[in-house]
Image (cartoon, coloured by chain):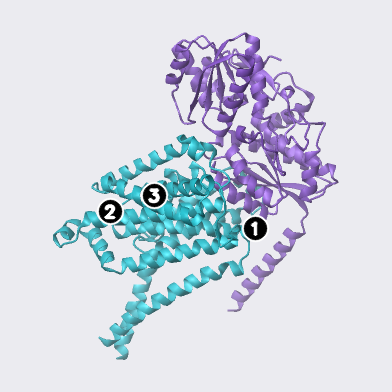
Chain colours: A cyan, B purple
Amino acid sequence: MRGIKELAMNRNTYSKVIDFMLFLIIFLFPLFDSNEYHLDVAVIIGIYCIINIGLNLLLGNTGQISIGQAAFFGIGAYCSAVLTTNLHLTFWLSICFAAILTATLGISVGLTSLKLRGHYLAMATLGFGIIASTVYVEWTELTGGTSGFLNIPAPSIFGFQLDNEFKYYYLVWAFVLLVFISTQHLINSRIGRALQAIHEREITCGAMGINPAKYKLKIFTLSAAYAGIAGALFAGFQNYISPESFSVYSSIIFLCMIVIGGLGSVWGSIIGTVILSIFPEFIRAVASSEFISPQIKAILNEHSYHLIAYGFFVLIIIVFLPEGIVGGVKRLEAKAYEWLHSKQIVIE
Amino acid sequence: MRTKRKIISIVVIWVFVMGILSVAHAEYRFGILNATTGAYAGLGVHKKKGIMLAIEKINKEGGINGEEVVGIYEDFESDPSKAISLAKKLIIQDKVIAILDCGSTAASLAVKKVTEKRKIVQVNTTPRSALAVDEPWPAYYFQTVPDNSVDAQKIGDFVKSLGVKRVSIIHDSNQYGTSGAIFQNDYFKKAGIEVVLSDKYQKTDRDLTSILIKARDRKTEAVVVWGTIPTPAVIAKNIRQLGMKVHYIGSSGLGSPKLIQLAKEAAEGIVFTSALAYGKMLPNEKPLFDAYKKKYDKFPNYFTALGWDCVMITVEAIKRVGGSKDTTKIRNSLESLSEFYGVIGKYKMNPTDHNGLDTSALHLVKIIGGKWVVLD
């Protein structure tokens, strides 16, 4: 018995050590790889991570689906763009306003749509996503319509301009760390357990004194605010935004990312985002490498092969790892744990 | 264990040798930022064909000073923010000396910041925004397509010659259509022609009867359409369904064989501007027509020509500075590129105009009996 307890404690500290190590790697990465294009991809990954951690909290932990996450992402981006470019507010104020605005919208959308369940909730949030896309295109005076919003200033801290990929990398990943820690705490708190209970048995929860509607609304609002923050970061980094980045298609990609990474796990959101963002780059690298003959290269160049490969890759993961990559790893870990445990007893 | 070690060492050596080979190979690298998926795919595929054919032709003729021209292709999926990332990739990772095409006006403007910062020439195929016309040309920003103001003038002159007094302008809500409509409105105001309706549509709209009924009620005599295929074909069909007897004049964006395929007999009588003089082969157009006919057994369209010219003017600029790979030198050479005949027309670039085409580059094409006929 003692052995198991010790192991369990060890396991807790061991996962903390792993968290620390992984973040250490993330924060040291730019020092080893100074290729600005790689950093550019890493910044976008960081921004998507913030959205996906929120989305995973909603879908993985609470069991509520949202196909309108890109809409909140876009609202945050346009809010920050308008405030910093037209009204000349600082980036930091604009990011606060973006979070507040998306949270408020999250409450109003959540109040009406969270009464729905399953497919109907998906439909409602999808509708919201489409409405938002139309607004970006049609409200030309404010958003610039399809031509996009130009000349968004880069943020600065105390007069220090964050105008290149290297500096921005640290800004974005600091935000990811912040969101990661707060979400991890949330999941391990009473609220987290309540969310898990709502996910499993909503009606029983109501009978046990947990108000499911209240919790669902809170989490929906929080995930909207995360997306809003990510939007503001995106606008400041790209210096340019257009409606294409916030389409329903993006919402679906976000869902794919967390499903592939692993539902209900914060690391799952990050890993899924990293893998689905890097995979196209990987195919691109393979297709343009010296190992492939010019004839095949010409064929690959002629067609949009990467989309096919991408789809195939997603399909394979879903078929062989239905609980996502983190789920797969956990299954392996449990097996190893079991094996260790049996050894322990023999030793005792 | 030993065989494993052997395999590893062989792989390492191979990678190393390949690395050396790829470094040792001297060439001119052009980044091609184009969209063959998404909203701009319809134009993107044609531009891509033009670019690839031009590169093929240059290499067949010995490249630049015996060095090969290599086009590194990236599809930005019609998403301008993806275009920004890919432009960085092309410049930093692939070390290209120029970025060609850029697919849409929005993408060209989005990429502008990257190309200006890193001093890389951007030769795009998209007209500049009407909002940016009063601003000076960005230093590294060049274009092969006649500016929308030129197109608007050509269309306006034709409408004037028809003796029409009341016109409607219907345009795509994108940057191209919107800025075209602004120029067109200006022209008609100056020419004393009344614009009874100016309205926009979305690229995805499949019925524009409501706009056309408004135009009919306001007794319009001509409809000027600023947009790209497929929606102008929908407008042609709707005009026929409503039984309207009006002149239909379109911008260069209509110049695609799809117009006749989609609108069928409703396309009859449509007049649009085109940089290519079909059936009246001009000497500067011959190389593209020959190369295209040989490969695809068809006539190239306007967008293919835009892509082709992108490569041709960049190569010409590089040749004029003795094959230099210095991007600032290439830029200066492009800026002073005058008296050069591309397929589109005669480029007369100068510091105040990084395009240098005028109305002489454009022709009027009318659809008669399901065929394109050049009017001038």
Q: Secondary structure at mark 2?
A: helix
Kind of residue sitting beneath label 2:
Leu
Kind of residue sitting beneath label 1:
Phe
Q: Quadrant of residue B101?
A: top right
Residue in the foreground of this view, choosing between B18 and B138 = B138
Chain for mark 3? A
Reading the chain from its start, which is encountered first: label 3 or label 1? 3
Say whether residue A23 is visible.
Answer: yes
Q: Which residue is mark 3?
A: A101
**Above or below, B101 relative to B5:** above
Q: Is residue B200 left or right of residue A66?
A: right
Q: Quadrant of residue B178?
A: top right
Chain for mark 2? A
> Are marks 2 and 3 in one subunit?
yes
Q: Which residue is mark 1?
A: A291
Q: Residues within 10 Å of mark 2 (few under 14, many from 20)?
A: many
Question: What quarter of the picture does the C terminus of chain A occupy?
Answer: bottom left
Residue in the foreground of this view, choosing between B135 and B375 = B135
**Above or below, A22 relative to A264:** below
Q: Are marks 1 and 2 in contact (CB under 8 Å)?
A: no
Q: Secondary structure at mark 3?
A: helix
Reading the chain from its start, which is encountered first: label 1 or label 2? 2
Q: Position of residue B195 (x, y in %)?
A: 54, 17
Q: Is residue B70 left or right of residue A246?
A: right
Q: Which residue is mark 2?
A: A217
Q: Residues within 10 Å of mark 3 (few under 14, many from 20)?
A: some
Question: What quarter of the picture does the N terminus of chain A occupy?
Answer: bottom left
Reading the chain from its start, which is encountered first: label 2 or label 3? 3
Chain for mark 1? A
- Outermost residue on the bottom side: it is A348
Q: Residue at x 72, y 44 (%)?
A: B139
